[in-house]
Image (spheres, coloured by chain):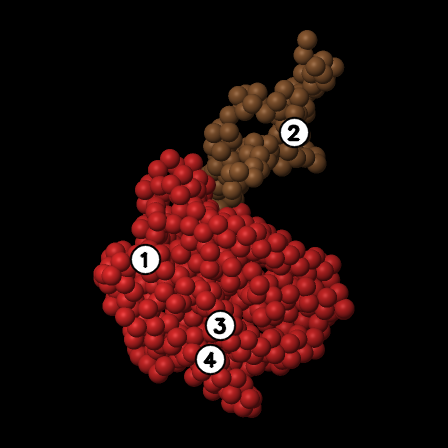
Chain colours: A red, B brown
């Protein structure tokens, strides 16, 4: 590849560690920087650098390689290994590039939403959160996953609470998230404890090998699987464990909402895939049963009830938050099918949904930035007041519904095909119903924006006031990307999904 | 006369000993149980005892919150910086063996000392930061201020 020849050799070999360490250390420096502008530039530097590095690594991995990095030079079963393969390389690139886009967006929006004294620490917490997410995706060591899970979660609680200067409810939302997130992390680490008890190792590949030799192991590993599934389920907002999500998404600063919506739940879903398919194995009875009956069922429930709740929200941010819960349902349905096609569809939807939801939340943030609007009834006439932002919102919304030629259509098509292939016709019906519900909750906003006239204040119609360019650029980039994926790059994204499902299902099939 | 004479005298006597014990735990970490985390907590405990006996304001004068904030970052940077140095010397991140050319065992020794110092600084600062944050919380709003 041409691009790779520009990258220093050292950066590729040490890339796995650089991606995690750089935001971590520069985040610590940013925490004591006096100036918010300087903090923003440091964040921009980190995100640009990480995105370029992650892209180079993605290209290397796309060539069919797997990268193994030994932390501190210690060999894997004892030392901590960082592993990058076809499953996590796209997620790593997703996290880095979304961090870059949100940082660009943050130049204006953070000034509007976070009080001055807290802006430099805000960027510090943002970088720590990014380091945590990257760490939990990169690492091949089960306990290291927990450490980075906590790093990312704790900085996320702080970031959500920073929305308090715009909306005091952010504090309650953050507290909710703190309690539920901590319970999730505790469940996860209890599960790890049981796994360690059963296998005596913390290296994921090693645990996987030992469990396969034991043919699933005793009841201890069964309990471990239960705890890990519930713990990660909380983190990825699996249906009945989603209660922290709407509040956190609705009241956090926009930059954080976008970053959370498009990366945090995705990283947790990645962990769930990694644990259920490579650490545990679908050939074990209990894993098979849980995935086929429980995860699939919860996924379908999320798709229907999440979409249904989204229709009745009065706050547009909560509408999209409930829609996120429904979209997680799609991903879980794909996982529950346990076929290569289902996993591919699920993985494609992880990537597509990140792009779509990013664009939508960016647009909502811009509405607030200009007019202080978040309620659905205030959308009246936005099509005339902010045509460009509303345009991006429309593209994102259509993509979320799954209109042909959009990214959402690609993932829903994949998912429906996989369901038919598995012989689950009812799943196709569920997908259709959920998509129809999506037409209602997105259509409701679009109707108000385009077919109602702008409100009048003191007898004068509110004037057009478009969002600033630095806010429009990342928003339109994602909106166009979601169309681009639908028209040109669907094969590429599906290929990424297939690479991931190859990693998950290599060797032993159920 | 100031109240709590006995407490004050005993505390004055104990605080330096506690701090000294913290450093004992810190540097004994190379040879036996102990290390940066425990030492950091003990060191912070000596300052917290000072604050409990002589008041929060006196403690904040002795160790200002701005130092605490810098200490937190500096601790992390000392830890991570060791890793960056090992990168520059051509090893993996935190591979101390490369720190001193030709003497991997010595390198590991110095590497772990640097890292543990970072941990000490970070943990002690974070403990103090948490204590200051809770200690200097504003009283609740009165009814009229709502």
Closer to viewer: mark 2 or mark 4 = 4
Q: Nearer the viewer, mark 1 or mark 2?
A: 1
Q: Is residue A40 above or below residue A50?
A: above
CA separation in Å, label 2 and label 3: 52 Å
Q: Are marks 2 and 3 on the same chain?
A: no
Gap in Å between the C-alphas at discs 4 and 3?
A: 11 Å
In the image, residue B118 above or below residue A158: above
User: Are both tags, 2 and 4, on one chain?
Assistant: no
Chain under disc 1? A
Placement of A70 over or under A91, stated as above or below = above
Task: State the CA–CA distance, disc 1 to disc 2.
Answer: 50 Å
Instruction: Give the residue at mark 4.
Output: A437
- Marking on residue B45: 2
Q: Are marks 4 and 1 on the same chain?
A: yes
- Marked residue chain, label 3: A
> Horizontally, is A285 left or right of A383 in the view?
right
Q: CA distance from mark 4 to mark 1?
A: 28 Å
Mark 3 secondary-structure assignment: loop
Q: Pinpoint residue B39: horizontal percent, then vertical percent.
A: 64, 32
Residue A264 visible = yes
Quarter of the image containing the C terminus of chain A?
Answer: bottom right
Nearer-the-camera pick, A143 or B82: A143
User: Which residue corresponds to mark 1?
Assistant: A371
């Amino acid at each position: 590849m041409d691009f790779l020849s520009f990258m220093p050799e050292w950066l590729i070999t040490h890339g796995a560690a650089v991606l995690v360490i750089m935001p971590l250390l520069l985040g610590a420096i940013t925490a004591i920087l006096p100036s918010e502008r300087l903090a923003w530039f440091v964040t921009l530097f980190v995100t640009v650098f990480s995105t370029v590095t992650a892209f180079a690594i993605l290209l290397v991995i796309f060539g069919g390689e797997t990268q193994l990095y030994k932390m501190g030079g210690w060999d894997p079963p004892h030392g901590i290994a960082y592993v990058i393969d076809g499953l996590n390389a796209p997620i790593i690139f997703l996290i880095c590039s979304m961090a870059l886009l949100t940082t660009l967006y943050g130049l204006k929006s953070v000034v509007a939403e976070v009080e001055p004294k807290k802006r430099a620490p805000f960027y510090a917490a943002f970088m720590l959160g990014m380091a945590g997410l990257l760490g939990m995706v990169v690492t091949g060591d089960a306990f290291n996953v927990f450490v980075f899970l906590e790093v990312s979660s704790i900085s996320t609680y702080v970031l959500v609470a920073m929305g308090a200067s715009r909306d005091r409810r952010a504090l309650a939302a953050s507290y909710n998230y703190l309690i539920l997130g901590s319970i999730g992390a505790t469940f996860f680490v209890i599960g790890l404890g049981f796994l360690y008890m059963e296998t005596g190792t913390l290296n994921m590949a090693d645990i996987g090998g030992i469990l396969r030799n034991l043919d699933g192991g005793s009841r201890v590993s069964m309990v471990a699987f239960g705890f890990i599934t519930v713990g990660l389920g909380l983190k990825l907002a699996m249906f009945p464990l989603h209660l922290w999500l709407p509040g956190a998404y609705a009241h956090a600063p926009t930059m954080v909402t976008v970053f959370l919506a498009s990366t945090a739940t995705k990283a947790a879903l990645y962990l769930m895939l990694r644990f259920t398919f490579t650490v545990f194995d679908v050939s074990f009875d209990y894993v098979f049963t849980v995935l086929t009956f429980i995860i699939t069922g919860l996924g379908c429930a999320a798709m229907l009830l999440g979409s249904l709740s989204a229709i009745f929200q009065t706050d547009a941010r909560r509408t999209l938050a409930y829609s996120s819960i429904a979209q997680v349902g799609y991903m879980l349905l794909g996982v529950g099918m346990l076929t290569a096609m289902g996993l591919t569809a699920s993985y494609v939807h992880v990537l597509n949904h990140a792009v779509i939801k990013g664009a939508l939340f960016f647009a909502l943030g811009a509405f607030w930035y200009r007019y202080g609007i978040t309620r659905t009834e205030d959308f009246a006439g936005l099509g005339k007041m902010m045509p460009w932002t509303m345009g991006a919102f429309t593209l994102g919304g259509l993509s979320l519904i799954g209109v042909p030629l959009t990214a959402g259509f690609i993932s829903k098509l994949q998912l429906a095909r996989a369901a038919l292939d598995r012989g689950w016709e009812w799943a196709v019906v569920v997908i259709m119903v959920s998509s129809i519900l999506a037409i209602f909750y997105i259509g409701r906003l679009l109707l108000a924006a385009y077919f109602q006239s702008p409100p009048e204040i003191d007898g004068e119609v509110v004037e057009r006031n478009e969002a600033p360019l630095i806010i429009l650029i990342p928003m339109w980039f994602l909106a166009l990307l979601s169309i681009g994926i639908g028209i040109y790059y669907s094969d590429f994204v599906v290929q990424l999904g297939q690479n991931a499902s190859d990693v998950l299902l290599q060797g032993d099939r159920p | 006369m100031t109240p709590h004479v006995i407490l004050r005298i005993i505390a004055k006597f104990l605080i330096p000993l506690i701090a000294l014990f913290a450093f004992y735990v810190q540097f004994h970490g190379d040879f036996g149980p102990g290390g940066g985390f425990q030492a950091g907590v003990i060191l912070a405990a000596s300052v917290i005892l000072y604050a409990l006996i002589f008041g929060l304001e006196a403690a904040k004068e002795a160790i200002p919150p701005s130092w605490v904030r810098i200490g937190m970052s500096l601790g992390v940077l000392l830890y991570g910086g060791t890793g960056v140095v090992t990168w520059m010397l051509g090893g993996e991140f935190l591979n101390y063996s490369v720190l001193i050319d030709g003497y991997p065992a010595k390198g590991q020794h110095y590497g772990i000392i640097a890292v543990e110092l970072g941990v000490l600084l970070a943990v002690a600062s974070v403990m103090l930061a948490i204590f200051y944050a809770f200690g200097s919380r504003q009283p609740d709003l009165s009814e009229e201020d709502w």
